[in-house]
Image (cartoon, rainbow, N blue to C red):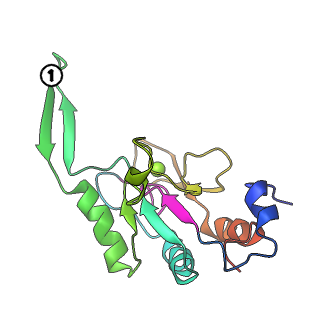
Amino acid sequence: MLVYNIAIATSNINLKNKYKMEICIDFDGTCVTNEFPKVGKNIGAGPVLKKLVEAGHKLILFTMRSDIEEVFSEDETIHKVAGNYLTDAVNWFKENDIELYGINANPKQKTWTLSPKAYGQLYIDDTALGCPLKLAYSDNQATMFIQYVDWVKVEEMLKTIGVLS
Ligand SMILES: [Mg+2]
């Protein structure tokens, strides 16, 4: 029996499809395999994310990716280099026809907080404690294994807590 986010699970028992969540979603290792700066491979996130949007939930991309890469030189000077890293992630959502409500911020939170953390009621991130992961052999010689979000298990968990039916 999964007991993640139990407060939501218990409060949602009779509220299925009424309580709409703002869900912050990491990108690398979560929506795709982590192959930063490239966009990684499909790991089955798309269909589950689509179901969340269709169920009325709002997705906020919450990623370290930026279109400005900060590179530190040996003297610790920061050099800012333009890139398309964040745009590539946003385009992945567009290409998969998944609507984004926000990018690294909840569009409405500025009305009630100055906090820099994107506000959501749920976060899905491959580095979050409790996030179910799959382990696979890596194509990269430098690392033997890669791990990424197990979306079959995540979908089960979302059903358990009443976010998906
Ligand atoms: Mg990640």
Q: Which of 84 and 159 is in front in this view?
A: 159
Horizontal relation, residue 50 to residue 36: left or right: right
| Residue furthest top in the image | 75
Crowd tier of the residue under label 1, counting other residues whose Cα lies within 10 Å: few below 14, some 14–19, many 20 or above: few
Q: Which of 150 and 142 is in front in this view?
A: 150
Horizontal relation, residue 12 to residue 40: left or right: right
Horizontal relation, residue 161 to residue 134: left or right: right
For label 1, the residue is 77
The secondary element bearing badge 1 is classed as loop
What type is the residue that disc 1 sits on? Thr
Q: Position of residue 83 (x, y in %)?
A: 16, 52
Residue at position x 49%, y 70% in the image:
58
Q: Where is residue 158 in the image (x, y as percent from the top left)?
A: 68, 68
Q: Is mark 1 within 8 Å of ligand 1?
A: no
Horizontal relation, residue 162 to residue 99: left or right: right
**Residue 135 appears in view:** no
Q: Where is residue 145 in the image (x, y as percent from the top left)?
A: 53, 48
- Quadrant containing the C terminus in the rendered view: bottom right
Q: Position of residue 94 (x, y in %)?
A: 32, 76
Residue at position x 40%, y 69% in the image:
101
Asked if residue 24 lies in the magenta stretch, the reply is: yes
Residue 40 placement: quadrant:
bottom left
> Start and end of the magenta stretch?
21-35
- Quadrant containing the N terminus in the rendered view: bottom right
Q: Which of 15 and 52 is in front in this view?
A: 15
* Above or below 34: residue 89: below
Asked if residue 50 lies in the magenta stretch, the reply is: no
Q: Looking at the magenta stretch, what is its main secondary structure?
A: loop
**Residue 154 appears in view:** yes
Residue at position x 19%, y 57% in the image:
84
